Image (tube, rainbow, N blue to C red):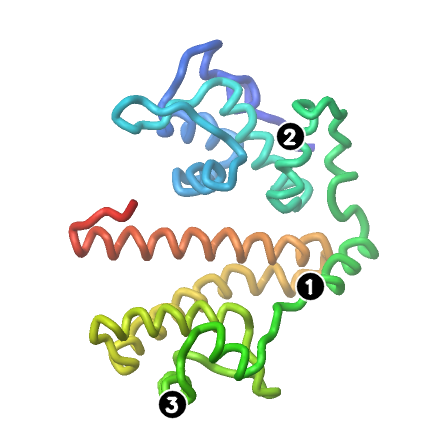
């Protein structure tokens, strides 16, 4: 049985109403969660798991309750492989006047339940070629060219996932600035490399003998994808010297 180190995150060492910086929170959490990072804390904030206060200059300030809540989120992820949505509902239950169920009741608790969760994951929505052309407001010739550069790829059944519509719209928008498909191949290659990095982390989870661990793989992939997108955005903004709203 894991124990929270004395004086660690589980004991609210932020001290009553005292507010502490994200660096201090990181130090407290690392006593029990050595792998946690500042990016992870920011991601959990972005997902609505914690809402630190902000100083007039925009710096995060965390209360003892924030630290306790973060520790509980990390503990439920580590010990029960629960997705963030389930964890959020569990933690918010008291505010709704409900009694939170034990963590084991909030997620897969046995092989059968986990396998059922994995087998019943909804498949991505698919659209036909005509639907994609209409939704993205592009021509057949444009779509043919984008496909020739590998920017959009149909399935074996000549269908497209819903995200292809977004990709098509963005390619068209960039085209209005003179960026042609040949210019965008570098972006596609970078995206493929980022996806490969995520897959390196997630692949062992998907192959794990424990069904609960396999069920945890999808949540991990989404979290890594979100962090990757945020990093890419930050790097582009830094390189251009601009800041997006």
Q: Circle 2: is it few (<14), some (14-19), or many (20+) Cα within 10 Å?
A: some
Q: Decide: is 4 above or below 89.
A: above
Task: Name the residue rendered at 53%, 57% in the picture.
Answer: 221
Q: Are marks 2 and 3 in contact (CB under 8 Å)?
A: no
Q: Secondary structure at mark 3?
A: helix
* Mark 1 crowd level (few <14, some 14–19, many ≥20, 10 Å Cα): few
Q: Residue most toward the top?
A: 16
* Quadrant the N terminus occupies: top right
**Dot 3 corresponds to which residue?**
141
Q: Which mark is residue 78?
A: none
Q: Quadrant of residue 106?
A: top right
Rendered residue at 45%/42% (across/down): 43
Q: Which residue is mark 1?
A: 122
Picture coordinates of residue 91 (x, y %)?
64, 30
Give residue 203's position: percent from left, percent from top. Answer: 57, 65
Q: Quadrant of residue 42?
A: top left
The secondary structure type at the circle numbered 2 is helix
Q: Which residue is mark 2?
A: 91
Q: Is residue 144 left or right of residue 186?
A: right
For the point 49% across and 64% down, which residue is it? Answer: 200
Tally the marks.
Answer: 3
Q: Which percent across, then down, holds residue 216?
A: 64, 53
**Please, is residue 93 above or below residue 179 in the view?**
above
Nearer-the-camera pick, 36 or 146: 146
Mark 1 / mark 2, whichever is N-terminal = 2
């Amino acid at each position: 049985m894991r124990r929270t180190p004395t004086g660690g995150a589980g004991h609210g060492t932020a001290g009553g109403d005292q507010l502490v910086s994200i660096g201090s929170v990181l130090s407290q959490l690392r006593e029990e969660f050595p792998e946690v990072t500042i990016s992870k804390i920011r991601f959990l904030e972005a997902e609505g798991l914690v809402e630190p206060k902000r100083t007039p200059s925009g710096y995060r300030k965390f209360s003892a309750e924030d630290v306790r809540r973060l520790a509980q989120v990390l503990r439920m992820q580590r010990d029960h492989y629960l997705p963030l949505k389930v964890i959020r509902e569990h933690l918010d239950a008291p505010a709704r006047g409900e009694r939170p169920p034990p963590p084991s009741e909030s997620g897969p608790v046995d092989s059968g339940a986990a396998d059922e969760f994995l087998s019943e994951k909804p498949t991505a929505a698919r659209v036909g070629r005509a639907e994609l052309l209409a939704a993205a407001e592009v021509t057949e010739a444009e779509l043919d060219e984008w496909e020739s550069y590998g920017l959009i790829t149909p399935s074996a059944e000549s269908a497209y996932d819903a995200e292809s519509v977004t990709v098509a719209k963005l390619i068209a928008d960039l085209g209005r600035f003179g960026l042609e498909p040949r210019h965008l191949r570098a972006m596609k290659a970078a995206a493929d490399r980022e996806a490969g990095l995520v897959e390196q982390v997630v692949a062992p989870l998907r192959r794990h003998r424990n069904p609960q661990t396999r069920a945890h793989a999808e949540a991990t992939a989404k979290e890594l994808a979100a962090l990757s997108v945020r990093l890419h955005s930050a790097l582009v903004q830094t390189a251009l010297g601009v800041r997006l709203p």
